[in-house]
Amino acid sequence: MGKSQETFNKKEKEKKRLQKRQEKQEKKEERQSNARDGNDLENMMAYLDENGNITSSPPDPNRKKRVINAEDIQIGVAKQEPMDEAELLRSGVVTMFNESKGYGFIKDSKSNESLFVHINSLSDRVREGDKVNFEVELTHKGKNAVGVKKIV
């Protein structure tokens, strides 16, 4: 008589495959038996409250609503108001300037704030401690000193 072609390992793999198939079928039947026909519309609704938070309860219809103008809504960075000409021309002292890097800082004598200055904004060579006149320019990063002239 001939020996069976199936080995022990093949039989075990076949048993595991059949067992997995049976477990999968059982899970499918359990899901189908526990499944609802779907949620009703009320359970699926979401509402926004006055602060923009998502809630499950509808807003109170008796509550007074606020009216908001579309022009008042700011998206992104707020616009900066232009400065008057008198404020633009200032004087100050160079607190730090690095010629190799090409930038430095000027301390405004009026407001005592430190303003960035680039080497391209200089009309004269400056060193630390020099008194200078300059104009203020608003950039997206803040105020910069431009048109810097050394006071003799």
Image (spheres, rainbow, N blue to C red):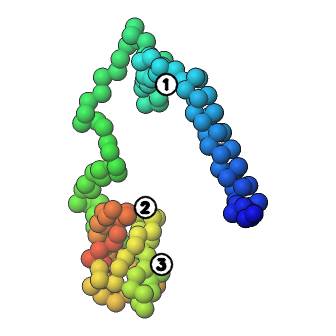
Any part of residue 36 in sight: yes
Comparing 35 with 93, the one in front is 35
Q: Does residue 8 appear to the left or right of 59 in the view shown?
A: right
- What's the residue type where badge 3 is placed? Thr
* Residue denoted by label 2: 111
- In depth, the one of 52 and 102 nearer the eye is 52
Please tell me which residue is depicted at 65% across the width and 46% down the height of the picture: 18
What is the C-alpha distance between the residues marked 1 and 3? 55 Å
Question: Considering depth in this image, is 76 or 39 the residue closer to the camera?
Answer: 39
Seen as rendered, the residue at the extreme front is 1
Query: Residue at coordinates 45% horizontally, 64% vertically from top-left?
Result: 113
> Residue at image x 34%, y 90%?
125
Residue beneath disc 3 = 95
**How far apart, in angstroms, are the residues tagged by discs 1 and 2?**
48 Å
Contact between marks 2 and 3 (CB within 8 A): the answer is no
Q: Quadrant of residue 92?
A: bottom left
Image quadrant containing the C terminus: bottom left
- Give the crowd class for mark 1: few <14, some 14-19, many >=20 residues within 10 Å: few
Tell us which disc is closer to us: 1 or 2.
1
Q: Secondary structure at mark 1?
A: strand
Q: Residue at x 45, y 17 (%)?
A: 40
Which residue is identified by label 1? 55
Work out how far the residue at label 2 is from the one at label 3, CA to CA, in angstroms.
Answer: 14 Å
- Asked whether residue 49 appears in the rendered view, the answer is no
Tell me the kind of residue under disc 2: Ser
The first of marks 1 and 3 along the sequence is 1
